Image: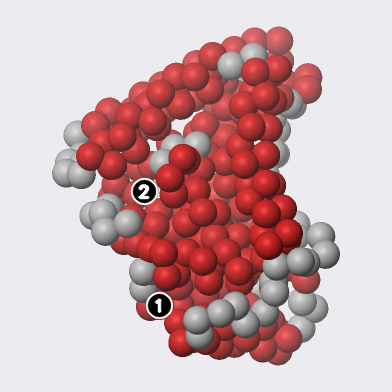
Amino acid sequence: MNHLKLVLEHLEKSDLEIYCCLDKKNNIDLFSALFQLNLELAKINQNSGEKLISEVKLSWWFEIIEKLYEAKTPLIKQPTILLLEEVIHKYKIKKSDLKKLIKAREFDLHNVKFKDSTEIRKYVDNYFTHILIISCNALNLELNKKQAEHLTQICYLLKIARIINSLPKYNYNNHPFIDQELQKDLAKYPAIKRQKEAINLLKKRLQDELDKLTKLDFPHKFLNNFANMVVYYCNETLKFSNERQIIYIAKYRLILHLKLVNLYKKFKLSP
């Protein structure tokens, strides 16, 4: 099993779960920049055959972050750097937070082997939690680790709901994004009933997480809206037909695509 390939795929397929639960209208540039940086860092280990090359690339990102806080104009016409340059000054993101995100990627260089899909998910979830906290810090909002972890877990369950709705022939066995506990529960049912039971199990797990979430204190109006959007999105996702899902997902993919297209035009880059 290529663990880093799975982690990278997990990250690439998980952006929407976070975007759709956040303040899409006003702050998508902030979340887009952080996720784009996270993917760039993940790809370093996916594309580099030697540890030394990966270390050099990570060092390069450390230097880029330093220079972004010193320079007033973009240093390199690369989409991720341009996104970061734009949001660092707009939201006053702490340099130390971005460096923590890069430093955490040094862990990948040790060729860690994951036992199963559950361990991979937990590893990826740690990044989501960290990005949520950085995002809220940049917006001068207090989001503690416990709150971020519950929101991350809810986003994971939403993603699994979409996967289960889209997989053909109820084939969930050994799917890299579906945790071992859920796979074992689904194995008890005949194939023809598996999709319905999977959704029922996810509804129960989502409700448990939402119950925990509502008991946490969200002192700021934005965070209350944040939590309400999560609840709304949970309800809507589990009711979606495949056709509605595709339209809904395409809408947010389009927003991110247009953001990058505008950057290409602004700085006269080649796609």
Can you say whether 270 is above or below 248 in the image?
A: below
Tell me which residue sits at (24%, 32%) in the image.
214
Q: Can residue 192 be seen in this view?
A: yes
| Amino acid type of the residue that numbered disc 1 sits on in the rendered structure | Lys
Q: Residue 247: percent from the left, percent from the top? A: 67, 24
Indicate the position of residue 82 as horizontal and vertical percent values. 60, 69
Q: Please provide percent x and percent y for residue 148.
A: 35, 49
Upstream in the sequence, badge 1 or badge 2? 1
Q: Position of residue 233 (x, y in %)?
A: 46, 26
Assign a secondary structure to mark 1.
helix
In the image shown, does 164 or 252 lie closer to the viewer? 252
Read off the residue under disc 2: 149
Mark closer to the observer (1, 2): 1
Q: Which amino acid does label 2 sit on?
A: Glu
For the N terminus, give its image quadrant. bottom right
- Label 2, secondary structure: give it: helix
At label 1, counting other C-alpha atoms closer than 10 Å, the crowd grade (few under 14, some 14-19, many 20 or more) is few
User: Residue 38: which quarter of the image?
Assistant: bottom right
Position of 211 with respect to 78 (left or right) is left
Asked whether, in this view, residue 117 is left or right of residue 66, the answer is: right
Of the 4 image quadrants, the one containing the C terminus is bottom right
Residue at position x 78%, y 22% from top? Answer: 168
The residue identified by callout 1 is 95
How far separated are the C-alphas under marks 1 and 2? 23 Å
